[in-house]
Amino acid sequence: MKAPLAIVTMVYNEPDFLPIWLRHYARHVDETACYIIDHGSDDDSTDDIGRANRIRIPRSPQNDTLRAEFISDFCSTLLCWYDAVIYVDVDELLVPDPARWHTLKDYAAALPPHQIVTAIGLDIIHRPGDERPYLQNETISSVRSFARFSSAMCKPALIRRATRWSPGFHCTNAPPIFDDLFLFHLRYADLDIGLKRLQRTRSQPWSEASAGSHQRMPDTDWESMLRGMSALPEEESVDFHKDDPVLSIWMDKVLESCIGREQETYRIDLHISGDRLWRIPKKFLGAF
């Protein structure tokens, strides 16, 4: 009999996000089912990870194509030992609808065999004028109130069969299927942490001069972008379940964008972004 669920990420010098990631996913599976691919960290951030698995690989220039190939092979191999596998970046927290599911393990066990689930993608948005900076050991949902829909975060994150991810893990070789699974992206969840991380990603070597432009922009541009998102109109009534009428409009836009992209690397339009900040429903309080 296989173990129920493994959860995988890949990191390089992530002192802020890795503790958040570990605390979150250790609530859903045993720490021994968490796999951290350490791509040459040299800041001690991967030294204290409890019983989670650290797999060290040599540091090399950032190459998202190579990362996707490696992770696709690694996660597909884990399916020899687990019924389901999740891959998420270290700033991505998956939550099944709390009104229906207690843990990701419970949610994954109820899925049909061979299923690949695309998460409903949401950027958590820090509003610096109204919300204080994040403090370590807090739950994100206790200090951040709003999220914005993002097609780029609608990622096929949970697999029950071998698959091949595209660079950035935005798509696989299967069409997207939405369900009761939400991905909360933390890149914009805190101004100070975001700028600190941007300094690191901007200075690290990249495999191509044109790669990762969104992770190498000047601080002023990134902060201006965050503050622009934080100033979007607010909407209170979105319930964050897969049949919510407002959320369904945006999910349908993603699915419609698949038409004609079946043979492309990215099978969805990655630039569909919400025009409102949606208040995070109370059912998610404490869930991430």
Image (cartoon, helix red, strand yellow):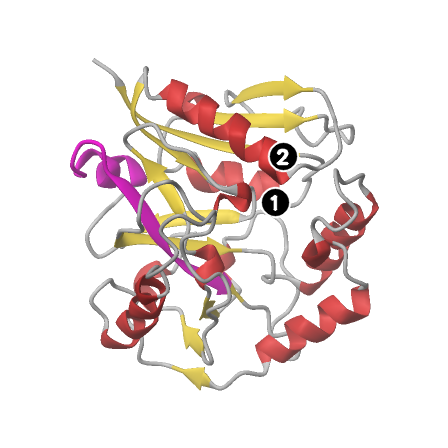
User: Which residue is tagged 2?
Assistant: 11
Horizontal arrangement in the rendering, residue 163 relative to residue 72 (left or right)? left
Residue 193 visible in this rendered orientation of the protein? no
Amino acid on which disc 1 is placed? Phe
Residue 50 visible in this rendered orientation of the protein? yes
Horizontal arrangement in the rendering, residue 161 relative to residue 17 (left or right)? left
Amino acid on which disc 2 is placed? Val
| Observer-nearest of 6 and 236 | 6
| Badge nearest the viewer, 2 or 1 | 2
Q: Residue at x 25, y 63 (%)?
A: 241
Any mark on residue 120, and which? none
Residue 72 on the magenta span: no
Range drawn in magenta: 104-123
Q: Residue at x 56, y 48 (%)?
A: 91
Any mark on residue 17, and which? 1
| Observer-nearest of 111 and 263 | 263
Q: CA distance from mark 2 to mark 1?
A: 9 Å
